Amino acid sequence: MKLIKVDKKSLDQGIEKAKSAYRVFGPVKEKSDHDFKLLDKEQLPDLDFQNTRLSPKSVIYPQSQIMFQYSLDESKEDCRIMKEVENVTSPMAVIGVRPCDALSFPIVRRNFDTPEYQDTYWVKAYEATTFVGLACNSACGTCFCTSAGTGPFGEEGLDVLLIAEGNDFYVKPLTEKGESFVQAAGWAGEVESAAASKIEEMKTAAEASITATVDTDKLRDKTTLDLYDAPFWEEEAFSCINCGTCTYVCPTCWCFDVQDETCGKSGIRMRNWDSCMFPLFTHHASGHNPRDVKYQRVRQRFMHKLKYYVDKYDNGIQCVGCGRCIRLCPVNIDIRRICNKMNSFDAESCVCEATSS
Amino acid sequence: MTDYTDKIKEIAKRVLAEGKVDMVIGFRAGTVPMMNQPHYAASAEAVEEMIWDSNCGLNLANYLTDKKGKIGIIAKGCDSRNIVTHVIENKIKRDQLYIIGVPCTGMIDHHKINAMFDKEILKVEESGDQITISGSGFSETVSKQDLLAENCAVCTHRNPVEYDELAGELVDEQADVDQYASVSKVEAMTADEKWDYFDDLLSTCIRCYACRNACPLCYCPTCFVDESRPQWVGKSQDPTDVRTFHLLRAYHCAGRCTDCGACERVCPMGIKIREFTKKLNKDCKELYGWEAGLSLDQRPPLDTFKADDPEEFIK
């Protein structure tokens, strides 16, 4: 597919033009931070950001989403019949997705789109969306994407990659969907002959700007129960306040809770993001809670991302290295620290308190 | 305040060695700027990790809830007031605690400091009352006074009110601060303006409950938002439910809030949560002459009755 170069003005004009065929989302600065929003007419994405505070997952998977509606009116034939709400599938495009976040969509897809089950809400929204990425020319101190299966110029999960160079943008279509978006935007412009090597240089420089790394190479070979019973969980979990920040800001956390709300004689069934950090997450109707204390919940989150997922899908960790949970955790629980502890944990050499005394 | 660190370590090691406590709760250095991590030390080795500087704004009393055994805890003014509140609310016994008091000169506000710079902050260093903030291609030194969290800037109880030992000399309390300046601004608004003001404050809330969970007052075994029979509050992002959570939580804190600012500090969205509790603090002060957590011998105004309690607000 052909590499294109456009200036900022053409880029903006193209985005505006594409709005006739797509609902376009992009980063917008509101209050002190950037977040992805549906862009109004004439509203342009603000591409001058390192990364958004919340990930773009909400574009495909809103925090609160109505799935069914029903009537409780006994006089009606359809009383108590759940009816699927209209599931909008008109084309969408998300502009300015960072490569780390882009990788989260194929990861989350492994959960929502399997041969046995398809989550219709997620799958329809995902299929209707074109992901227009924005390469990172410089990383945050908390970015570790190169240890998490992608990189600042990573392409997995994207349909188009934009690369900012001064006041210009290289536009690199990666899929047919991406090609269609580029056509809808009317982006066209020859690139200089040295463009490919220029991009390669920028990519190398961007990768070199990443200072944080984690080791994940030994996670798969660890015995699950050894890690589960590792002695460090209580200490590492001490500061945790069991809020939902890490899970809600995480692009790859996918859990939800189903709720019914009725008003008079009509009702809705919806789903809302849930968090394994909340005690209620595993609270059984019987009153029993298998993850009754906080270190068990903290352990679950990291074991899921860094061990269970790794074992189940054999496709790396369930983390893209965006660093949001590190930046936003109110009590500084740092996934890099935990991941390295898990990766280097040696059950053989561990002298547990129980055996040493 | 950085020179408290050595004294804290010395005391912590001593009380652990003497068997006065099973653990000491304090802070260790965090992995990102302006973020220290609550931490416990049960051995001299773990004490070595302890630190004290102007990034210890979380309220450690939050980590005492339902703890058994003997506990050492580092307490600045607000933490000590919340410890007192825990004791008078029977959450912990005073004789379980060895309180290492830290006279405080205020904590810096990471939300404010992050908003001051367009670029990512990579390092924040403290030297006396000067804070140097730096990142790629910039470095700026600012007076700590200008970077204080809003609650610290108007704090009148910097010294611990209850302690067994101090990690430093008592500091002068701030005089001439208007603790309730922000409340007066809201009070002057019309009803519609107030509605819009609070609506705007909550517009970015993601209901992560960090504010509730960082608050030492929020120790209910089951919070009202988590009740399912009956379910008092909806779980979605419906603004009515978001408002209900914040307003009810604020009222649960009436007469108990020490304005430690933990709720605001931990909010990932930077919401000014104290705007919801400050008015109630002001009312308690004006109506009952009460500030929370100052004495182990006094019951809070909302769990006592006096014949001369003000009642002008009952119409």
Image (cartoon, coloured by chain):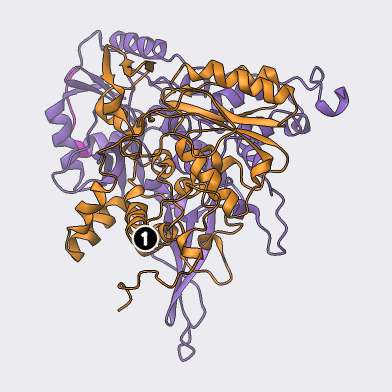
Chain colours: A purple, B orange
Q: In x, y percent, where is residue A128?
A: 37, 48
* Stretch in magenta: A184-190
Within-10-Å neighbours for mark 1: few <14, some 14–19, many 20+: some
Q: Quadrant of residue B45?
A: top right
Q: Which residue is mark 1?
A: B243
Regarding residue A94, the answer to whether it shows in the image is no
Identify the main secondary structure in magenta.
Answer: loop
| Percent x, y of residue B303 | 51, 64
> Quarter holding the C terminus of chain A?
top right
The residue sitting at 77% across, 33% down in the picture is A225
Q: Secondary structure at mark 1?
A: helix
Quadrant of residue A352 in the image? top right
Q: Is residue B174 magenta?
A: no
Task: Check the image and report above or below for A201 versus A226.
Answer: above
Residue A187 included in the magenta stretch of the image: yes
Percent position (x, y) of residue A226?
77, 29
Depth order, front residue of A290/B254: B254
Q: Considering the image in quadrants, where does the N terminus of chain A appear?
A: top left
Q: Residue at x 42, y 15 (%)?
A: A210
The residue positioned farthest toward the bottom in the image shown: A75
Q: Residue furthest front?
A: B308
Disc 1 residue type? Arg
